[in-house]
Image: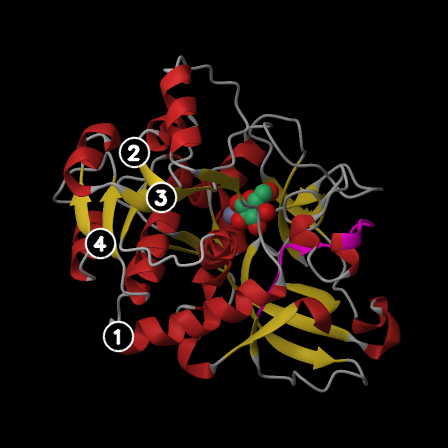
Amino acid sequence: MKAISVFPGKLNSVHLAELPKPSINEIPNGRGVLVRVVRVGVDGTDKEINAAEYGAAPPGYDFLVIGHEGFGQVEAVGENVTELKPGDYVVATVRRPGNSIYDLIGTDDMTTDDTYYERGINLRHGYLTEHYVDDAEFIIKIPQGLRSVGVLLEPLTVVEKGIHQAYEIQRRLKVWQPRRAAVMGAGTIGLLATLVLRLRGIEVTSFARNPKRSLNAELMESIGARYTEVPIIEAGKKFGPFDLIFEATGNSSVVFDSMQALGKNGVLVLSSVTGGDRMVQVPADRINLEFVLGNKVMVGTVNANREYLETGVRDMAQAEAEYPGWLSRLLTDPVRGLENYTELFQKLKNPNGSIKVFCEVAEV
Ligand code: BGC
Ligand code: ZN
C-alpha cells in the first residue's frame, strides 16, 4: 500500500513509500480496528516536518508516514471491539501514551515524558496511506450525518482542548462569565476557535492579516464574529478588554502582543507550534506588571485526548444545526489521490485563498 512519507531532518523529502497492509492482529487483546483511510487534512505541522524543522521516524524506519488529521471508515474489528463495526466512519487521535502518570490515566496529551509519540508527527507513522490499524481506545466514531466534514475533527480538537483548559483554569475565579474573546489568526484553527466560542454565546473579535474581502473574513462574519486587520494592542482598546484570547497565528511574536490586550483575570491560550528560532523585543516590565496586578493567566495547549474528540463531535453537530453548511466551506482544497503529494504540498506552501488543504485518499 502507498503512503506519503518524509525522511525527517531532510529538507523537502516528501515522497511515496510502499508499506504492507496492516492487520488487526497487530493490536493485542482483540481490540484492533482496521480503518480504510478516506480523507486526510494537512497543516503547518506537515509543512514544518517536510521543512526538516520537526518530526521523527518510528524506531526501525528511516522514513515517517505523515498525516495526522485522519478520517476513514472501519473495515474490520477484533473480537473484543463492541463499540465500532465495519462501515462506521471514524477519526483516530494523534498522541499515543508514554509512561508518565498522565499517560496512564488516558491523558497522554498532558505527558511529562521528554519523548512523546504522535501518529504522523513524532515516532509513529500517520494516516496519509490507504489503511491503518489501531486500538479501539484511540478511535472515535463520527455520526453518518457528519461524514462530509469529519476530516475537520482533528484540527477542531486543538480548539476544544484549549477552550476547555481555559474554563478549567478559570474555576480559580468563583465566577467567570467570559463575554469578550479575541481569536488571533484566521486559518483553520482560528476559524474553528471562533466557531466554538460563538457556539458558547461569546462575542468574538478575530484578528488576521488577510484582507476584509477574503473567504476567511466572510466566514467569521457569517457566524457573528467581528473581523479586523487592526493590530490587537490597538483594537484591544476599542473592542476589549478580552476575557479570553486564543492564539493560533503560528507567529510567536503575536503572543507578546496578545499578552498586552488581555483583560483583568483573563486567560490567554497558546496553540501555535513554532519550530523556528524567532527573537523579539517586548515591553517586559509593563507586560509583567499588568499580569501581576490583573491576575492574568497564559497557558500552552497541545493535542489531544479522546475527551476532546468527543466534545468536537458534539460541537460539529451543533454547528451543523446552527450554521448549516458552514463547516464544509472550510474544505477549500481537495487533492485527489496519494500519488498527488506534490500538489498537496504546493497548495500547503502557497495558500492563495485556501483554508483547508486535504487529500482525498478514497471516496467518502
Ligand atoms: C497537531 C497536534 C499535535 C501538535 C504537536 C499539531 O499540528 O494537530 O495533534 O499535538 O501538532 O505536534
Ligand atoms: Zn495539526
Q: Disc 1 or disc 2, which is closer to the eye?
A: 2
Q: Disc 3 or 1, which lies upstream in sequence?
A: 3
Q: Which mark is residue 261?
A: 2
Q: Mark 1: which secondary structure? A: helix
In the rendered image, residue 6, in percent from the top left (x then y), is placed at 63, 38
Report the residue that reaches farthest toward the left.
213
Label 4–label 3 contact, CB within 8 A: no
- Quadrant the N terminus occupies: bottom right
The crowding category of the residue bearing disc 1, from other C-alpha atoms within 10 Å (few below 14, some 14 to 19, many at least 20), is few
The crowding category of the residue bearing disc 3, from other C-alpha atoms within 10 Å (few below 14, some 14 to 19, many at least 20), is many
Colour mapping = secondary structure
- Which residue in the protein does label 3 denote? 245
Q: Disc 4 or disc 3, which is closer to the eye?
A: 3
Q: Which mark is residue 220?
A: 4
Judge whether residue 363 can be spotted in this image: no
Q: Disc 3 or 2, which lies upstream in sequence?
A: 3
- Which residue in the protein does label 1 denote? 322
